Image: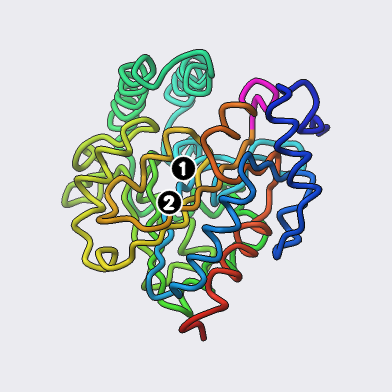
Amino acid sequence: MTYPVPWINIPVRTALAIWYQWTTRTELPELSKVSVLMRQRNKVENTLRAMQHAGPGTLQVISDFDMTLSRFAHHGKRVPTTHNILDHRLLIDEGCACNMRKLLQIYYPIEIDPSLTSEQKIPLMVEWWTKVHHLLIQQKIQRDMLAQAVQESGVILREGYEVFFDRLAELQVPLLIFSAGVGDILEEVVRQSQVFHPNVHVISNYMDFDANGVLRGFKGPLIHTFNKREGALLLAAPLPELRERPNVLLLGDSLGDLAMADGVARPRNLLTVGFLNDQVEERTESYVEAFDIVLVNDETMEVPNAVLKFITSGKDAK
């Protein structure tokens, strides 16, 4: 797969920001990678120093899962999301799979369309998720088949994920994974990757199985890409592990992911990292405006790992 050079055909203001990052010294050489874009490098470095000074005891990490912790593509082929993993003949028939793919072709372009506002997208995202969940419920999926489906799916977490998960666990920094995908599948992916540590918390769409282990519905309110603010306020804010941690490192691949930190009580420092995986030319400007750090077609955790190491290498670090 050939990827475009990030700074070609983007507005002058963004190009100047990129030039500035290349001509300014940084304590993190990883931030000078070709795939890294920043609009306000000084702000990023000041936030990093403030978070480092405060120490890991004040830090929490909030991350999306699909196409953020998991890869977008590998060897030129798309990596399955948690919903895509359910497209397995152990779980659903060909008719259901065909209908799910048709829905993807209709709604995914809407989800990533930079010309539409979140308000315009929300009812269509609800429509998409609801239709998919209805199709899945009709299949009477067996809970004890999920692990095998994950194992055979080809899902891959980003290179360096072990370092990221293990460092957070070592320092007892909470990792809140906030996903619009399927929580049961997400947990199984993390578990099979051997990084489901005690500090990991998941907020997602969970399946509801009957006494025989057959899918009969989904639990709780629907979580989709553009209502994570409501989910953060309702589900994340009450978690006691997060209440006294005002510094937040946020990872996402959608502008809607920026709302995942809205449930943080009295936030002090927030550093946002956005993975720009698709429609790079069309979405670069909006991502650079919204995220502190943008990673373009980067399938690794190299930059998040460097950021995490820097933040946690100061006060109270082990």
Where residue 82 is drawn, which disc sits there? Answer: 1
Q: Is residue 280 magenta?
A: yes
Q: Which mark is residue 197?
A: none
The one of 233 and 246 positioned closer to us in this rendering: 246
Q: Residue at x 35, y 48 (%)?
A: 261
Which SS class for mark 1? helix
Q: Nearer the viewer, residue 92 or 40?
A: 40
Q: Is residue 157 left or right of residue 196?
A: right
For image coordinates 34% across by 62% down, the residue present is 246
Q: Quick check: is 111 in the magenta stretch?
A: no
Disc 2 is placed on an element classified as helix
Task: State which quarter of the image contains the N terminus.
Answer: top right
Q: In the figure, 149 relative to 315: above or below?
A: above
Quadrant in the rendering for residue 276: top right
Q: Residues in magenta? A: 278-283
- In x, y percent, where is residue 221? 20, 37
Q: Amino acid at mark 1?
A: Thr
Please tell me which of labels 1 and 2 falls first in the chain. Answer: 1
Q: Which residue is mark 2?
A: 186
Binning the other alpha carbons within 10 Å of mark 1 as few (below 14), some (14 to 19) or many (20 upward) gives many
Task: Categorize mark 2 by other alpha carbons within 10 Å: few (<14), some (14-19), many (20+).
Answer: many
